[in-house]
Image (cartoon, rainbow, N blue to C red):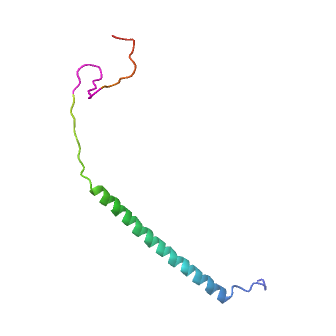
Amino acid sequence: MNTNDKGIPYIVYEGLAVRYERAVERAWIVIILLILLLVGSNGAWLYYESQYDKSSTTIEAEQDGAGVNIVGNGDIDYGAKGEDHN
């Protein structure tokens, strides 16, 4: 055994222990705060989403022929006219 190894003085050990206790206490406070913020944010978006009535519309349509039938109000621009008139 080396005779120069004296170990850690008790006062240094106590200082480190107190420092780690404070760090652990702060970590618990942060963890609890984050959990509360998570629950609060989930509650906030659930409240926001519950303000609106959800409705759906079902449209049944039939198409006769092979072309695309587009019905609209007003002027509809289908792009440039093609040369193929078949």
Depicted 32 relative to depicted 77: above or below:
below
Spot occupied by residue 81 in the image (x, y as percentages of width and height) = 38, 17
Query: What residue occupies the far right of the structure in this picture?
Result: 3
The C terminus: image quadrant:
top left
Q: What residue is at 38 percent from the left and 11 percent from the top? A: 84
Q: On the rendered structure, is 63 left or right of 2?
A: left
* Residue 72 among those drawn in magenta: yes
Depicted 13 relative to depicted 66: above or below:
below
* Residue 36 among those drawn in magenta: no
Spot occupied by residue 32 in the image (x, y as percentages of width and height) = 43, 72
Q: What residue is at 27 percent from the left and 24 percent from the top? A: 69
How many numbered discs, if any? 0
Q: What span is colored magenta in the figure? A: 62-74
Depicted 79 relative to depicted 35: above or below:
above
Q: What residue is at 22 percent from the left and 35 percent from the top? A: 59
Image-quadrant location for residue 14: bottom right
Spot occupied by residue 55 in the image (x, y as percentages of width and height) = 23, 47
Image-quadrant location for residue 12: bottom right
Q: On the rendered structure, is 65 left or right of 11?
A: left
Query: What residue occupies the far front of the structure in this picture?
Result: 74
Image-quadrant location for residue 50: bottom left
Q: What residue is at 22 percent from the left and 38 percent from the top? A: 58
The N terminus: image quadrant:
bottom right
Q: Main secondary structure of the magenta part?
A: loop
Spot occupied by residue 46 in the image (x, y as percentages of width and height) = 31, 59
Query: What residue occupies the far bottom of the structure in this picture?
Result: 10
